[in-house]
Image (cartoon, rainbow, N blue to C red):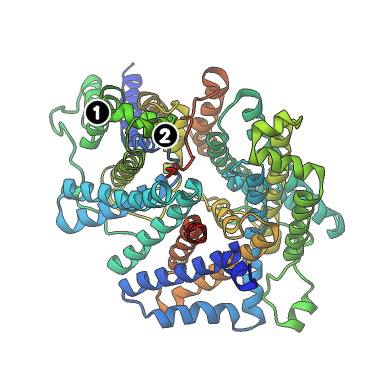
Amino acid sequence: MSKVEKFLQSAFFRTLISIVVGFAVGAVFLAAVQIDVGAAYGKLFTSIFANAKSLSYSVVYATPLIILGLSVAFSFRTGVFNIGAEGQFVVGSMAACVVGILVPAPAIVLVPLCVLASAVAGAVWGMIVGILKVKWGINEVLSMIMFNWIAFYLSNYIAGLPAIKSDGNAEATKNVQEAAMILLPKSVISKLGLCNSANWGIFVAILLSIFCYVVIEKTTLGFSLKAVGSNRDAAEYAGINVNRAVLTALGISGAMGGIAGAMNLLGMGQRISIFTAQESYGFQGIIAALIGNSNPLGVFFGGLFYGAIKYGGSRLNLIGAPSEVVNVIMGTVVFFIAISHIFKFRKRKKEGK
Amino acid sequence: MDALINNLGIIIYASLLYTPPLLFAAMGSCFSEVSGVVNIGIEGMMTIGAFTGATVGYYTANPWFGFLCGGLAGALFGVLHAIACVNLGADQTISGTAINFLAPGVAVMMAKAIFNSSDTVPLDPSSKIPLLFNGVFSSGSAVSNFLKNVFSTYATTYLVFICVVVVWFIFYKTRFGLRMRACGEHPRACDTLGINVIRTRFVCVCISGFLAGLGGACVTMATTNQFRPISIVGQGFIAIAAVIFGKFRPQGAMIACLLFGMCSGLRIVIGTSNAAISAQLISMIPYVVTVIVLILFVGKSHTPAANGKPYIKTK
C-alpha cells in the first residue's frame, strides 16, 4: 500500500473529512437562519488565532476537555462507556474548591493537596459505579446517570453551606485562596501577552496524555485492560481478573475526571456556582475522546480542537451569530466519525473483486 | 387530616405533572433498546421535540398540532440515528452522543433566529395542552380540592398512560412486537426465519424518536409554557435510566418513571412547607433511592442480548 493510500485509509484522514463536513453542515444551518457564513466563521477563527492572548484562551478552554477526554478514552479501552465523567468532574472540582477555601497552606502544599483531593473524589465516584457493577451486576450506564445527578445536587448543597458560600449575594462559593490557583507567573503572562487565566493545567494535560499512552500501550495492566475491552470472556479464560480490571479502569478514569475539574477551577473558575442545570462538561469530554479515536495523542488534539472552537464560538455572540453553531458542528463531526467506516468498507470490497 | 389530604393531592398532582415527559421518552427508549439499538440520543430528540412543539403551538395556536409536530421533529432525528446505526452499522453510542449535541444546537439556533432569543415566547393557556375535566371539580372542601388536584390535569397525562397500555399491547400481543423483541435478542436467527431485521429496527428507532419528541413537547406545552435551553437537560437520560431500571419492559419503565415523577412532586411539597431541609438534598432523593432499590430488589437487569451490536447481513 502506498503512503498516500495508507493516509487515505487512516482514522486521522476520516476525522479530517468529518471535521470538514461538520463545518459545511454548520454553514448550512447558519445560512438557514440568515447569518453571513463568511462573517461568522471569520469571527470564529480570528477569535482563536488573533494573537497570543486568544490562543492562550483556547488552550485554557481546552485543558479540562483534554483531561476529560482522556478519562473517557481510558475506560473506553476497557469496554466501559464513562458517561459518568460529568459527575466525576463535578465532585473533583468541589473537592478542590473545599480544600482551596478551607485549608490554610502555602501554594507549594496547597496546590498538590487540591489536585489530590479532586483525584480521590473523582476516583471514589468512579469506583462506586464499578463496585455496583461488579458486586451487584448493576448496569453502569444507569448508575453513572444517577451519580451524575447526585454529584450535581451534592455540589449545589456544599456550595450553599455557610463555611463555603460566598459572603455576598452571589449564588456561588467563595473564591479559593490565591495560593491555590495554578496561574502562570504574572511576569510570564505579560511578557508573552497571554490571557489572565493562562495556567499550568495544559502541562498536566500533556503529562496525563503521556501517562495514558504508557499505561495503555506499555504495561501489563494496560494489556489486561485492553483484553477485557475487546473480549471479556476470552480475557477471563486467559486468567485476567475481569472485575478488578473494570474497577481499576473506572478508578483511574474517575481520578482523571476529578483532576479535570480541579484544573478548570484552579486555572480559570476560582469558584463554583450553584447551577440550575448540569454544565455537560462530561459530554464535551466524550466528544473529545471520540474525535481523538480514544487514542491519547488523538484525544489531546481532539480536546485542543474542541477547546479552541468552544472559545471561538463564545465570541460569536459579539456579531449576533448564535454560538450554538458550535454544538451543531461538533455533533455533525461526531456523527460522521460514527459512520466514516463505511468509506473504508466500500474500498475494501472493491479490492476484493 | 385535611392538610394531609390536601398535601397528598398536591403530591399526586405534581407527580402527574412531571411523569408524562419522562414516560413518553421512556416508551420511546423501550422501542429502540428492545429491538437491539442503544438510543442515547433520546435527550436530543426530546429537546428538538420540546422546541418544535412550543414553536408550532405558538404560531398555530393549535396545541395538538404542535404536540404532533414535536413528535415528528423527534422522529426526524430518529431517522438520522436509524440510518447511521441500522443501515450503516455505526457505533450506536457515538451516533447517539452526536445527536445529543446536534439536536439541542439546532433547537437553540432556530429559537434565536425565530424569536431573537434562546427562549420561545410563552404560550397562551389556550395554546397549551388543555386541562382535562377543568371546572368539573370545584374547589371547596378538602376532598373536592383533592379530586380537583388529582383529576384536573393536562390531557397528556391521560394520553401517556393510554400510550403505555398500547406499547405493552404492541410488545407482547402483536406479531410485530414479537419480531422486534426477537431482533433484539438474536437478529441472525430472525433473518434466517425471513424477518427483515433492518426494517424492523429502523421502524423501532423512528418510533423511539417520535415518542421522545412527544415527551419533549409535554415539557414545553404542558408542564411549562415555553422552550428554554435548559427545558430538558438530563430528562432524556433519566428516561433511559428508567428503562434499564424497569428491565426493558414498558410496565417496569412506567413504575420507574412514576418513582422519579413522585420524587419531584415530594420535592415541591416538602420544599415549600419545610425550609429546614435543603432543597438540594431533597432533589437528590430519587437518584439515591434508585441506586438503593437496584441494590436491594432489582439487581442484574437482563439487557436484550444483541443490544448495541450492529447487525450486518452477510451476503
Secondary structure under the numbered disc 1 in the rendered image: helix
Q: Which amino acid does label 1 sit on?
A: Val
Task: Name which residue lies at 58% across and 77% down.
Answer: A48
User: What's the chain of the residue with tag 1?
Assistant: B
Task: Name which residue lies at 51% across and 25% down.
Answer: B301
The number of numbered discs placed on residues in the rendered structure image is 2
Determine contact: label 2, label 1, CB under 8 Å.
no
Image quadrant in which you'd find residue B106: bottom left
Residue B181 picture location, percent across and down: 37, 29
- Give the side of residue A46 with respect to residue A2, left or right: left
Q: Where, quadrant-wise, is the N terminus of chain A in this rendering?
A: bottom right
Q: Which of B112 and A33 is in front in this view?
A: A33
Residue B296 showing in the rendered view: yes
* Tag of residue B166: 1
Image quadrant in which you'd find residue A147: top right
Could you confirm whether marks 2 and 1 are on the same chain? Answer: yes
* Tag of residue B187: 2
Query: In this rendering, is residue A90 above or below A65?
Result: above
- Closer to the chain start, of discs 2 and 1, is 1
Of discs 2 and 1, which sits in the foreground? 2
Mark pair 2, 1: CA separation: 24 Å
* Structural crowding at the residue carrying mark 1, measured as other residues with C-alpha within 10 Å and reported as few (<14), some (14–19) or many (≥20): few
Q: Which amino acid does label 2 sit on?
A: Pro
Task: Name which residue lies at 65% across and 31% down.
Answer: A233
Residue B292 picture location, percent across and down: 56, 24
Query: In this rendering, is residue A344 above or below B315?
Result: below
Secondary structure under the numbered disc 2 in the rendered image: helix
